[in-house]
Amino acid sequence: MNTELTTDTRELLAALRDLLNVPEPADRGDRPKRNLQLQINLARVVGTLNALVSVDHPNVAVAVRMLREDLAEPLDYATQDETAGGAR
């Protein structure tokens, strides 16, 4: 029995992790925007998982590409990292 993760599976898990790790806003007043982004990303995660488990031979690479495209969308608030000189 092979228990190692494939490269595609590792990339999928990393993309799912990154979607759920929504940065904190620099301004506390933007917490509702962060919460909305978290809800959107959670729906993306659930949708992706549903799509992957609903077929016999899922295309994990395509799922990863789509999740990475979602992650590339800019946030509509400044993050703590951005104000400290970091990036998303």
Image (cartoon, grey):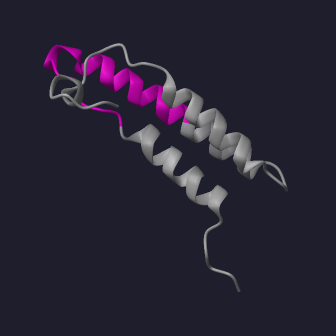
- Tell me what residue is drawn at x 71 percent, y 47 percent: 61
Q: Residue 4 is drawn in which quadrant?
A: bottom right
Image-based side of 82 in relation to 46, left or right:
left
Task: Give the answer, above or below, for where 80 lies relative to 4.
Answer: above
Give the x, y percent position of residue 11: 57, 52
Residue occupying the point 38% across, 19% down: 75
Between residues 39 and 60, which one lies in front from this camera angle? 60
Q: Is residue 50 left or right of residue 25?
A: right
Give the quadrant of the C terminus. Answer: top left
- Magenta stretch? 22-44
Residues 5 and 87: in front is 87
- In percent of the image, x 49 and y 30: which residue is there? 71
Farthest-out residue, right: 56
Q: Where does the image place residue 23, in percent across and percent down from the top left?
A: 29, 32
**Hey, which residue is sitting farthest front in the picture?**
85
Prevalent SS, magenta region: helix
The reply, left or right, for residue 88 in relation to residue 42 is left
The picture places residue 63, in percent across and down from the top left corner, at: 68, 41
Q: Quadrant of the N terminus?
A: bottom right
Is residue 76 shown above or below 79?
above
